[in-house]
Amino acid sequence: MASDDVHVYPTGDVIEHDVGGGECPCGPSTEPVPRPDGSMGWLIKHHSLDGREFTEHNYTGPAMPRER
């Protein structure tokens, strides 16, 4: 990953997300993004660990796990 890659991460989560190039425990997903010069950069999308996306009205991911 390069220094100009872009990280998107939740604020106020139960952990501090690693945006310095290490291993983040949230298991971020990566998406290649073309740069204006023709090279490729990366968009790194971090995931919350507090489950906030399950309460968002436009969430389209997997169903929220149910507690037993």
Image: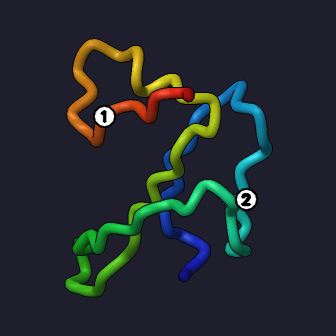
Closer to the chain start, of discs 1 and 2, is: 2
Residue 62: x and y, percent?
29, 41
Relative to 8, residue 30 above or below:
below
Determine which quarter of the picture holds residue 37. bottom left
In the foreground, 68 or 34:
68
The amino acid at mark 2 is: Asp
Label 2: few (<14), some (14–19) or many (≥20) C-alpha neighbours in 10 Å: some
Residue at the (27%, 27%) spot, across then down: 59
Is 30 rendered above or below residue 64? below
Q: Secondary structure at mark 2?
A: loop
Q: Residue at x 21, y 33 (%)?
A: 60
Query: What mark, if any, has residue 18 been given in the picture?
Result: 2
Instruction: Indicate the quadrant containing the C terminus: top left, top right, bottom left or bottom right.
Output: top right
Residue 35 appears at what percent x and percent y? 27, 73
- Percent x, y for residue 46? 53, 51
In the rendered view, how is the structure colored? rainbow
Q: Quarter-wise, where is residue 12 in the image?
A: top right
Is 27 left, or right, of 54 in this rendering?
right
Dot 1 corresponds to which residue?
63
Image quarter (top left, top right, bottom left or bottom right) of the N terminus: bottom right
**Helix, strand or loop status at disc 1:** loop
**Mark 1 Cα shell of 10 Å, populated few (<14), some (14-19), many (≥20):** few
